[in-house]
Image (cartoon, rainbow, N blue to C red):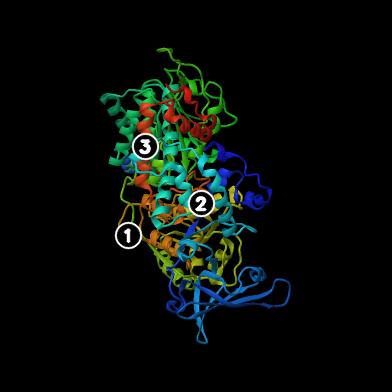
Amino acid sequence: MAITDAPYTNNILLQGYDRLGIRSVADLIRHYPARYEIRPDHTPIASLTHNANGSTSGTLTSSRWVAGWGRAKGRFEAVLQDDSESLRLVWFNSPFLRDKLHPGITIAVTGKVKRSNGFLEMVNPRWSELAGDQTDPDEASPPIRPVYPTTEGLTSDRIAGHIKRTLDWALPHVQDPIPESLRSKQNLLPLDRTFDLIHRPQSEDDYKAARRRLAYNELILLQLGIQLKRAHTHHRYASPAIESSERVDQRIRDRLPFTLTPAQDHAVRQIAQDLATPVPMNRLLQGDVGAGKTLVAVYAMLLAASQGWSSALMAPTEVLAVQHYQRLAELLRDAELPVDLVTAGIDTPTLTPDNPRLLVGTQALLNREGITDRIALVIIDEQHRFGVRQRGHLRQTTQTSATGVLQKIHRPHQLVMTATPIPRTLALSLFGDLDVSTISQPPSGRRPIRTVVSPPQQIDIVHADILKRVAAGEPGFIVLPTIDDQGDDDQTAKGVEARARQLMNSPLGEYGIEIAHGRMTPAQRAAAMKAFSNGRSRVLVATTVIEVGVDVPDAGWMVIEQADRFGLAQLHQLRGRIGRTTGDKPCICHLIAQPTTDQGQQRMAAITQSTDGFKIAELDLQIRGMGEFYGTRQAGASPLRMATLPDDEALLKLAGRDANDIIKSDPSLSNPEHKLLRKVLERQLGENIDLIDIA
Ligand code: ADP
Ligand code: MG
């Protein structure tokens, strides 16, 4: 594609394009239509139907400009006639039509048809002239019109014109990175033809085929990138091989306070397998809050310790690090594995093979001198963040065992724990360099949660419902998106403080109401939490601060106000705060919302119908699309534009297999037919990958 990367230098055309992110010819050609308008078939005028889109053609019998107030204001009127009937045409504020639409010429028109006062009429129709040898209306106006994303001053039609003119000269210069052999195997269009058809399709099949090719392109590049990265890691880095045995395994299990659940057991086996080889583990352990991930982590750390290796557990904040430290110290009381909290003011303890330890801290810990040398395993607890992007900033040391020719760089095995379920298809595509273990069932059956949606007008009914539960001794949460938004009345009280004030004066007030939000001091918040968790107050009105850290197992109900302002995954996360004890008595989660958009309604339906975090994550992805899924999780922009998941899963798998075949047969992409692919990848991956390095 070399030549099309030249800047798009026509100054007149450049206006507005920068706002669309278009800076080169290649960008322009990759500005794909957002959708297509299908032109109705041409019919005689008499066959046009009222209130429907129609296309027809005929001869103009009259035309005139009716001036209005102000320059260019007014309307251009014309009458179109064929053998069957006549059609009135009106264009508003288009004086320039005077120079174009003269009586006697033949034109084709497309637009919405109205019948008023017995006359057929089209307002602001699209038109094209049938002149010279072009007498077929189907040819004069294309059957499918691309509609482009626009910006101020650039209409879709203008963009279409620019693209059309650019394609005319640029297409012959387009080079295709996908080798011909692969294209014919997967029945993919060549790239030049693809660009042509995505912008100028003659049929639905045309743009579908073009779309498929472009989606495949994105997916195979992604897969190649991921697989090359993996190959690169294997080639350059080594982690200690920590072999287990039945005896070691049994000893570790004996030390754990619980028998592992089947899901934990499965995860533990996968991790033990990873640790047994010098290939650095890069695994994601996902499971809802309370799924029992910590025990899996503890197993892995004990396994490392059994061979004299220390481990490090990283938390996102210092507060969470302290919590982890306390829990682990308790869990490992009898396990002969010293646990150290390492924070800013504390020195790193000495790590030796006879003295393996478990260090707990924030990620800053990894930057300490000499730490990673004696650490075999780093466990990162991401909590709710999707921060897969932050991975991999481990300090690398050059200390290696000098086996073989190549000096591999020591790197600890990595396990990332997350409570944010990542949809399977996303995990497969974007984080394909991660292996994933999933704990989908918590250790013990939790209380079932029923979720219902009520409109804001019914908030009193909801409050009456929870009053019954509160009176029966059951604590619970009221969650609002804002702190001190006042609202107009009780029903629309929008913030934590307004809602709490209102409830204190209601029958619920008798049972004690606490508030918690991010603007309180830690001491104030701690006091409120304490009153709530020891049962003195049974209602906690809070912002999403309760997402992390509040653990009141008896809590059996939750009200989430303005629920449509939260993401699906977040609603699920919040809901996970209740029903944390075993039992059959159902918990209730009231969502207060009255969504008006399709999307909003779909989301509310999804959350009421499922309590499976993975299903919800996949639905979230399906409903909101990848872009948004990314945005809210600060994981950077999605590299996919044409491909959409989960819809393109089949194509993703195909691309994954093809990428694998390519790398197997030509790991450094030095084969001439992969030359372009290599160039594109080098640009995409930047210096992250030294392709030459991969043997
Ligand atoms: P996560 O880290 O995934 O949020 P935790 O590891 O904190 O979950 O576990 C949640 C709760 O379940 C804890 O109270 C823990 O002690 C308990 N737990 C974990 N594993 C088991 C098990 N195998 N059997 C019984 N209880 C368990
Ligand atoms: Mg946890």
Q: Tag 1, which secondary structure? A: loop
Check mark 2 vs ligand 1: CB closer than 8 Å? yes or no.
no
Q: Which residue is mark 3?
A: 182
Image quadrant in which the C terminus is located: top left
Instruction: Say whether marks 3 and 1 touch (CB < 8 Å).
Output: no
- CA gap between label 2 and label 1 equals 53 Å
Tell me the kind of residue under disc 1.
Lys
Check mark 3 vs ligand 1: CB closer than 8 Å? yes or no.
no
Question: Percent position (x, y) of residue 420?
Answer: 44, 46
Judge by depth and name the residue closer to the eye, 387 or 102: 102
Residue depth check, mark 3 versus mark 1: number of the one nearer the observer: 3
The outermost residue toward the bottom is 117
Residue depth check, mark 2 versus mark 1: number of the one nearer the observer: 2
- Residue at (57%, 48%) from the top-left corner? 166
**For residue 283, above or below residue 473:** above
| Disc on res. 585 | 1
- CA gap between label 3 and label 1 equals 58 Å
Q: Which residue is mark 2?
A: 32
